[in-house]
Amino acid sequence: MFFNSSVMGFLLLLCSSLIVSLSSGADTITANESISGDQTLISKDGKFELGFFKAGNSSNYYIGMWYKKVNTILPTVAWVANRETPVSNRFESELKIIDGNLVLLNESKSPIWSTGLNSSSSNSVVAVLLDDGNLVLRDGPNSTGHIWQSFDFPGNTWLPGAKMSYNNITGKKQLLTSWKSLEDPSEGLFSLELDPKGKQYIIRWNRSTPYWTSGTWNGHIFSLVPEMRANYIYNFSYVENQNESYFTYSLYDNETISRFIMDISGQIKQLTWLEPSQQWNLFWSQPREQCEVYDYCGAFGSCRQSGLPFCNCLTGFNPRSPSNWSLTDFSGGCVRKTELQCGRTSEKYGFLPISATATADRKPPNFTVLAVGSSGECQRTCLNNCSCNAYSYDNNGCSIWNGELLNLSDDNDNATTIYVKVASKDLPSQKKNNGVIIGAVVGSVVGLVLILGLILFLIHRNKRSVGKTAVEGSLISFVYRDLQTATKNFSDKLGGGGFGSVFKGTLPDSTVVAVKKLESVTQGEKQFRSEVSTIGTIHHVNLVRLRGFCSEGNSKLLVYDYMPNGSLDSHLFSNEKLLDWKTRYQIALGIARGLVYLHEKCRDCIIHCDIKPENILLDTDLCPKIADFGLSKLVGRDFSRVLTTMRGTRGYLAPEWLSGVAITMKADVYSYGMMLFEFISGTRNSEQSEDGKKRFFPMRAANVLIDGDDILTLVDPRLNGNASAEEVTKLCKVACWCIQDDEEARPAMSQVEQILEGLLDVNMPPKPRALQLFVDDDDHVVFFTESSSSQSSQARSNPSSGVSQAKSTAST
Ligand SMILES: *[C@@H]1O[C@H](CO)[C@@H](O)[C@H](O)[C@H]1NC(C)=O
Ligand SMILES: *[C@@H]1O[C@H](CO)[C@@H](O)[C@H](O)[C@H]1NC(C)=O
Ligand SMILES: *[C@@H]1O[C@H](CO)[C@@H](O)[C@H](O)[C@H]1NC(C)=O
Ligand SMILES: *[C@@H]1O[C@H](CO)[C@@H](O)[C@H](O)[C@H]1NC(C)=O
Ligand SMILES: *[C@@H]1O[C@H](CO)[C@@H](O)[C@H](O)[C@H]1NC(C)=O
Ligand SMILES: *[C@@H]1O[C@H](CO)[C@@H](O)[C@H](O)[C@H]1NC(C)=O
Ligand SMILES: *[C@@H]1O[C@H](CO)[C@@H](O)[C@H](O)[C@H]1NC(C)=O
Ligand SMILES: *[C@@H]1O[C@H](CO)[C@@H](O)[C@H](O)[C@H]1NC(C)=O
Ligand SMILES: *[C@@H]1O[C@H](CO)[C@@H](O)[C@H](O)[C@H]1NC(C)=O
Ligand SMILES: *[C@@H]1O[C@H](CO)[C@@H](O)[C@H](O)[C@H]1NC(C)=O
Ligand SMILES: *[C@@H]1O[C@H](CO)[C@@H](O)[C@H](O)[C@H]1NC(C)=O
Ligand SMILES: *[C@@H]1O[C@H](CO)[C@@H](O)[C@H](O)[C@H]1NC(C)=O
């Protein structure tokens, strides 16, 4: 069908001598040109493209602007001209300049969208798509100003360089409004606007009900969006004069692709394009919790923060519009499966108890609180009132909801029991009082059975595969069946890393091995084998040795030496297996050596990308072995797996992970530095920062170093001061040097190795900004720092190296 319409369009183009076609790649529409069909405008630097696009599977076409360099399945649209007035045939519609305005004509050549300027009837007006994503009208091709710009009419996207303003003369506000759904860019219910009085932003539902505010701007941050502090990527500024107040922002690095949207989820989101992983990465979103969005699930829908999807209809209710519901547009809410037959016998109703809060709309006339003596009386009141939808009875009295129940959330501490009126036949049959609970339990049991079934199916499918044992380089190629036997059908799970789960196994010759089942290997068979054999050639005493692999169909497994002492985190952070200082220092040195080997001694340099205590294994002698190296390459370009698997484990990621620039070995250096602090303190850096009272450990350590205070106060108290002050100082300095913001300012691992070996001296590096980048439980990447902005600019402008000079080359 797509093919047919293109052919048709082509024929149309051929037949129509009236349409002057644009030269391809042009960034300008002049008076006698038009855009139609598949023609597009492209900005000079090739960043943005403008033309007809289709949103999702809908059959409607819109004139929109999208990122040309962003290769997502659907284009990432930053601006839409005719949000409310789509066309269905893009070859018969055209965008052209008529009487000094840019106008979209539909199939019957009626204007359906226009820039709406009072015509100057100027013949020289042109439309130009600029590099920053601004579409402007200019009076004359050589004019530099504009008489109209798309930046003044944002849709759901706020681009760098644009303003979000309040006009103090006209009182008009610029709104950022969400799309209705993934397939419909027309104005949705959620909008962001500036509140000049409070110097803050507000999100409103249906242009009225406010449900989120940013808090006052203090010159650096909004009081309720602390994650904007020390923002590494964006430079926000606020401007206020008698004519207008506005916010604008720029990017420190003009190569970064980043945008700010009012999402259909009712949240504002800041996203950055990660070139290495070819994905939009969520930087932060507000409100943080999906369920804090006003009326997100609609009437009689219940929001569960831990659920997927977030919204579910109450028992006895169905989505009003299942198709919208499946497009995650929940705003229509839910309706009763069986309409209530009001006025008939009350036998037909029942009350479904739900544990929830209904925070919104506790206002008359549809919500009343009655002073009645008992729960029974409250129930009777609701039963006898046709328009009563629900009641609750508690210390506040008898609450009666006559209107729709909005904003139900079932994981709130303050939940009360609300009884919802439903037709008796829609009540769960077993125990009426526990309707909801029974529903939930049944749901999860069914889910569990399904998952088990799936696992069994996969195992069974894999069983069918056959293979032969072969030798590839020094690696053994295992047969799946044998590994299944060795691991007792993958029953003894040692852990789950970023790339798959690891199981303990015993080979027929009694060698104990660790078998890693890789997930989502994107490579073909040949490439996989070649990559694996590369990893197989890497041997170093501080790297876990790969013994073999298995590749049968979709099953890709790696077989490693088994490390009886488990991973470093289980020693460092536990009380049972306390590591003494000497061992910690030796482990730090061993890891440095392993990394030097990966970075500098292998044929192809290998960046580990995920250095953290969980990925350091210890052998029987507590000699450290780095695990999982080379795997980010195996699973393809998807570097952001590293980001997503960081869920929960915070604070090892270098800031450049977010800026979209290529990751270098210095990202490993950063992670190593963060880990060194944990060697000293014996606790996770992140744990300490979460406790509001203690300072983020790396900052505390840097201050102790700079102030010349007693370094041993930093050391894990469980060691009772049994540590070498000289070595602690050295580790501290190296760690501070490794976590510099600017990767150029960090040492190479070989320098670190030499310092730890005593071959190099180290000066105090500049105080690190100690940004803490982590991925929270909702997959948001967040930065935190304790330093003030003056400290951060100091760190930025002083990236000098921390090394002084080579001391001696005595030992080897
Ligand atoms: C547009 O076309 C008209 C008539 O065909 C012509 O007079 C005019 O010069 C053209 N304008 C431009 C900018 O080419
Ligand atoms: C579009 O339709 C295809 C096929 O029906 C489906 O696989 C896909 O998920 C749909 N996309 C969206 C965004 O709904
Ligand atoms: C084009 O727009 C006009 C005015 O809105 C409308 O009456 C007409 O039906 C539209 N034509 C088509 C083919 O949709
Ligand atoms: C356009 O002109 C009309 C009358 O000539 C006037 O009422 C209107 O305010 C003008 N609009 C703009 C945007 O200048
Ligand atoms: C625009 O500038 C170009 C080159 O500077 C010149 O050739 C052309 O005549 C100018 N056009 C107008 C309308 O001034
Ligand atoms: C939004 O508000 C308008 C009135 O301003 C109202 O007509 C409309 O029904 C409201 N939408 C919803 C979904 O409540
Ligand atoms: C941030 O933006 C403001 C205003 O646009 C500008 O004056 C300032 O130099 C920018 N700061 C940096 C560090 O780029
Ligand atoms: C906005 O305009 C009013 C009068 O029109 C003025 O009193 C007020 O100070 C202006 N606001 C700002 C921020 O200048
Ligand atoms: C406010 O608008 C007036 C009239 O357009 C203009 O003269 C003045 O310079 C503007 N003030 C600022 C601060 O932009
Ligand atoms: C980015 O900045 C560099 C240096 O400031 C400049 O040379 C380059 O033209 C800029 N690129 C874009 C797309 O603005
Ligand atoms: C009260 O409930 C009725 C019935 O659901 C509804 O039509 C009406 O809009 C509601 N009124 C308010 C103020 O919410
Ligand atoms: C629970 O109620 C108390 C008192 O009304 C309030 O301070 C608290 O924020 C509420 N908690 C939640 C999670 O809503």
Image: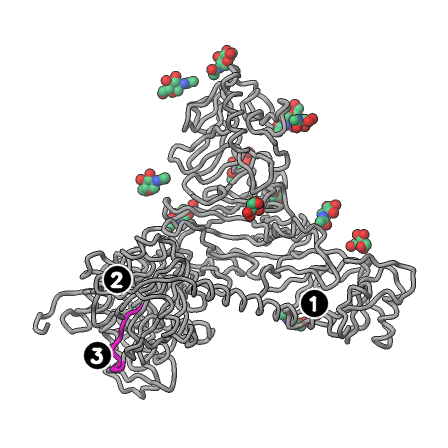
Give the extent of the magenta segment. 620-627
Specify the amino acid type for callout 3. Glu
Figure quadrant of residue 747: bottom left
Which one is earlier in the sequence, the residue at label 2 or at label 3? Answer: 2
Q: Is mark 2 on a helix, strand or loop?
A: helix
- Mark seen at residue 357: 1
Q: Residue at x 46, y 38 (%)?
A: 133
Give the farthest residue toward the right: 344
Instruction: Residue under label 3, please give it.
Output: 726
Q: Is residue 767 visible?
A: no
Disc 1 residue lies near ligand 12 with CB under 8 A: yes
Specify the amino acid type for callout 2. Ile
Q: Position of residue 446 (x, y in %)?
A: 62, 68
Instruction: Residue under label 2, please give it.
Output: 535
Q: Where is residue 633 in the image (x, y as percent from the top left)?
A: 32, 56
Q: Does the magenta stretch include residue 621?
A: yes
Q: Is mark 1 on a helix, strand or loop?
A: strand
**How many numbered marks are there?**
3
